[in-house]
Image (tube, rainbow, N blue to C red):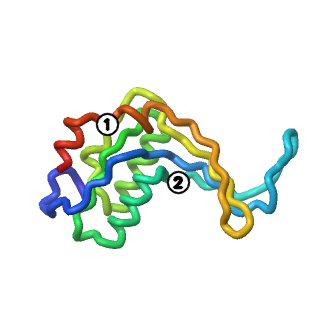
């Protein structure tokens, strides 16, 4: 979906976009100076972006739009490319800013419990202005 798509925008999501570095399930957290082995995946994340992605995949006719910000770095490019390949979210209001993309390390434990370590850069706060929001509405 692209900016100006002929489908009406029934739902606009405004908020954070992160890139998640996620582990497969680990049985316990390592102590300091210990190591654990797990499969690692790098995926689009952020509560707002995840909600928009899931909503867009479930209701593609709704014209889902994401108003958010990502960096000009390789992680921002990966984020944009991943969402574009899914094709469910209008990325025309995904602002690119000259700061690192917000990143979160997601440790997945027994039963799907999770622990997070985040870097909240300028892409996760304060970069979405009223003009950008108004354009999406």
Apparent side of residue 42 relative to residue 2 in the rendered image (left or right):
right
- Tell how many labels: 2
Q: Viewer-proximal residue, 36 or 130? A: 130
| Residue positioned most to the top | 98
| Residue positioned most to the left | 6
Classify 129 as above or below 133: above
Element carrying mark 2: strand
- At x 67%, y 52%, the residue is 115
| Mark found first going from the N terminus, 1 or 2 | 2
Q: Residues within 10 Å of mark 2 (few under 14, many from 20)?
A: some
Question: Can you tell which quarter of the image residue 77 is in?
Answer: top left
Classify 34 as above or below 22: above
| Quarter of the picture holding the N terminus | bottom left
- At x 68%, y 61%, the residue is 24
Whole-percent x and y of residue 95? 31, 38
Question: Can you tell which quarter of the image residue 130 is in?
Answer: top left
The numbered dot on residue 90 is: none
Q: Viewer-proximal residue, 107 or 96? A: 107
Comparing labels 1 and 2, the label whose residue is closer to the camera: 1
In three-dimensional space, the C-alpha distance between marks 1 and 2, rounded to whole angstroms, equals 22 Å
- At x 57%, y 51%, the residue is 42
Q: Residues within 10 Å of mark 1 (few under 14, many from 20)?
A: many
Element carrying mark 1: loop
- At x 16%, y 57%, the residue is 5
Whole-percent x and y of residue 93? 26, 44
User: Label 1, on which residue?
Assistant: 128
The numbered dot on residue 43 is: 2
Mark 1 and mark 2 in contact? Answer it, CB < 8 Å: no
Whole-percent x and y of residue 109? 72, 61
Question: Can you tell which quarter of the image residue 117 is in?
Answer: top right
């Amino acid at each position: 979906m692209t900016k100006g798509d002929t489908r009406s925008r029934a739902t606009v999501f405004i908020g954070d976009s992160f890139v998640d570095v996620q582990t497969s399930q680990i049985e316990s957290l390592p102590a300091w100076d210990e190591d654990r082995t797990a499969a690692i995946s790098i995926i689009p994340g952020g509560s707002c972006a995840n909600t928009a992605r899931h909503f867009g995949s479930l209701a593609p006719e709704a014209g889902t739009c994401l108003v958010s910000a990502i960096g000009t770095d390789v992680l921002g490019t990966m984020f944009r490319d991943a969402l574009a390949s899914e094709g469910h979210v209008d990325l025309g209001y995904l602002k690119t800013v000259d700061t690192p993309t917000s990143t979160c390390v997601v440790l997945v434990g027994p039963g799907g419990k999770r622990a997070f370590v985040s870097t909240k850069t300028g892409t996760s706060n304060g970069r979405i202005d009223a003009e950008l929001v108004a354009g999406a509405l």
